[in-house]
Image (spheres, helix red, strand yellow):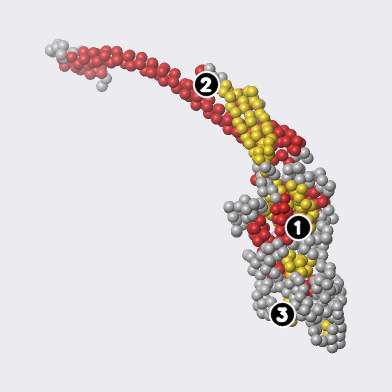
Amino acid sequence: MSWKGISRAWAGLCQPWASATCSPRGRFSEKGADMLSHWKDKNGKEKGIAIMMTAGIMMALVPVAGLAIDGGVAYVLKSRLTSATDAAALAAARSLSVGLTLAQQEAEAKARAIDFFHANFKPNAFGTKNLTVDAVVAESNSKTRTVTITAGFDAPQYFMRILGFKYIHIAGRGQASRRDVNLIMVLDRSGSMGSHTDPNSACAKMKEAAKYFVGLFAEGRDRLGMITYSSSYFPAYPAKLNFKTSSPTLVSVINNIQCAGWTGIGSAISQAYLDLKAINEQGALNVILLFTDGNANTVTADYPVKKLTDTRFGGYRGYRVYNTTTQAYDGTATCTSTSSTCSMLPSPCKDGVGNQFDRNNGQTKKFFDAPNWNPNWNPLPIRGSLAGDDWATTGQTQGVMRHIGTTMNASSEFLTTSGCAFSTANFLTHNSNTASDRNSLARRDIAFMPDEDIYGNSTSGYRPVSTFTSGPYAGRKRIDRPVDVTSAAFNVADNLAKRAREDPLFGIVFYTIGLGSVDHVFLRRIANDPASPIYNPELRDGLYIYAPSQDQLKDAFMRIASEILRISL
C-alpha cells in the first residue's frame, strides 16, 4: 500500500473525532517536519566543508602524483642512460685491440663508445634535449686501461610544470677496464691433423682459426706467442708486444705450420708456463690456450738406460743377439712380439765418450776392444720424448725422440747424436737405421718410466700407470705397454696445469679447444672448466670448447677470444 493510501485510511478512522492528534499532520508529522528541516540545514553545511577539504587534498595530491609520475619517467630514463653508458664502456674496452698504435686504439675505442651509446640512446629520444656524451681512455694502474663514459641530458617534466619545473638534468657514468693479456698459444700439429696443403684438413682449418684469433688482440698492449707441438715442441714465436708488425709477424709464422708426428702436450704446456713466468708480469692476465685433436701420449723425461736383463714385451722388429761363439750377430731377431713377453738383454748403446757396455765381460770382445770397452760403464739418463700408442695394452712404444724440435715442422726426430743415442744404427750396425727399427729398440734401451718429467711434473696421477711386478725393475713404471706411457702423459699434463693454475704470483688461466676424438674430461681438468670433476671455484674459471669438426674451429677460437677479453674487462 502506498503512503497516500495509508493517509486516506487514517483520515477515515479519525473523522469522528476530528482531532488534531488524529490528523496525519498531527504530532508525528510536525516532528518529522522539524527533523527534516534540521537535516537540510546540517547537510548543507557538511557539503561546504567537503568541498573545501577536497580542494585542499587535491592541492596536496596533484604535486605528489605529479612528482611520482615525473619521478617514474625520470627513473626509466636514468635506467636507459645507465644501460647506454655501460654498453658504450664495454664496447670501447673491447675495441682497444683495434689499431696498431696506442693512439689509434684509443681513438677507435672513443669512436666505438659514441656509436654504441647513440645506438642505445638517440638524441632527443623521449622528449629529452641537450644530450652530451664523452669518452676518456686512461691507464688506471699497471697493465690496465680504463674507459670512462659520461653522459647527460635534460628530461621533460609533465606534471611538475605546475610548480615551474619544466626540465630536470639526468647524468650517468659507465666504466670498464681492460687488463693487458700475456697469452701463449699451444697448437697441436700432430699427424692426425692431416696435410697442411689440403684446405679442408684440420691442419689448414686450425691455421685459419688461429690467425683470426690473433687479430682480436691489441698490438703494443697484449703480448702473444706460440708453441707448436707434435712428438716434440717447438718455440715457434716468442711472446712479444709487436706481434702484428714485427718481422716475421705471428700470422706469417702460423701460415708456415705443417702437421706430422705424435702428441706431446705435457712438455708444450710446461714450456708455455715457463715462458709466461719469464715475462714476469703479475698484474697482467696470463693465459695459455691449448688446442688438440687427440690424446696426450708423449712424455719428456730423463730416461735411465736399461743395463740389466729383464722380462718385458718385445718390440716389433726385435733385435739380433751377438753370438760369442761365432763372433757375429745371429741372423734371426729375438723379442719381436709386442703382445708377448721375452727375456730382453741390456741396451748396447754408447756412453758420452763412445765407450760401450761389455755384456760379454771375460769373453771374446770383438766389438769391445779398447778404447771402446768399459766394464764399469754407467751411462747417464737420456733426455728425450717417449710416445705410446694411446690406450693399447700391446703395441709399439716409440722413441726416444728429441723433446725440442730442430724446426717448427720437423716430424718425429729420433736421437742420433753422440752418447747413448737410443734406437739408432749406432747400436753396432746390427739393424738398419729405419723408423721401424728405432721404434722397436726403444723398449730394449729404456729401463723404466721416471717418476717425474724434466719439468718436475709427476708421471703418477688420476690415470693409473702399471709397474713391473718382478725382476730388477720391480715397482718401476712400465714403458713396454703403450697404455702406461699414455697414462703417464695425461698425468704429466694434468699435474702441470694444476701447478700453473695455483701459482700464487701468476695464476695462469687455461683455455682448451678439443677437435674430434678427444678426452673431454682431461681438457676440462686442464682448463678448470666449471664442468670439470676437479673444478676449483677459488681459482679463476677457464673454459673448454669442443669442436666436433674442423669447420667449427673458427667459432671455437672466437668463443675463447671473447671469453678472454670478457674476463680481462
Instruction: Give the secondary structure at mark 1.
Output: strand
Q: Nearer the viewer, mark 3 or mark 2?
A: 3
Q: Which residue is mark 3?
A: 311
- The residue that appears at 12% across and 12% down in the rendered structure is 17
- The residue that appears at 75% across and 76% down in the rendered structure is 306
Q: Quadrant of residue 227?
A: bottom right
Q: Position of residue 186 (x, y in %)?
A: 74, 55
Instruction: Give the secondary structure at mark 3.
Output: strand
Q: Residues within 10 Å of mark 1 (few under 14, many from 20)?
A: many
- The residue that appears at 32% across and 14% down in the rendered structure is 45
Distance from Cα at disc 3 to Cα at disc 2: 97 Å
Q: Nearer the viewer, mark 2 or mark 1?
A: 1
Q: Amino acid under label 2?
A: Phe
Q: Position of residue 42 (x, y in %)?
A: 29, 15
Distance from Cα at disc 2 to Cα at disc 1: 68 Å
Q: Amino acid under label 3?
A: Thr
Count of all numbered marks drawn on residues in the image: 3
Q: Quadrant of residue 419?
A: bottom right
Q: Position of residue 110 (x, y in %)?
A: 71, 33
Mark carried by residue 501? none
- Quadrant for the C terminus, please: top right
The answer to whether residue 539 is left or right of residue 454 is: left
Q: Which residue is mark 2?
A: 159
Q: Amino acid under label 1?
A: Asp
Considering only order in the chain, which callout, 2 or 3, is on the residue closer to the N terminus? 2
Q: Which residue is mark 1?
A: 188
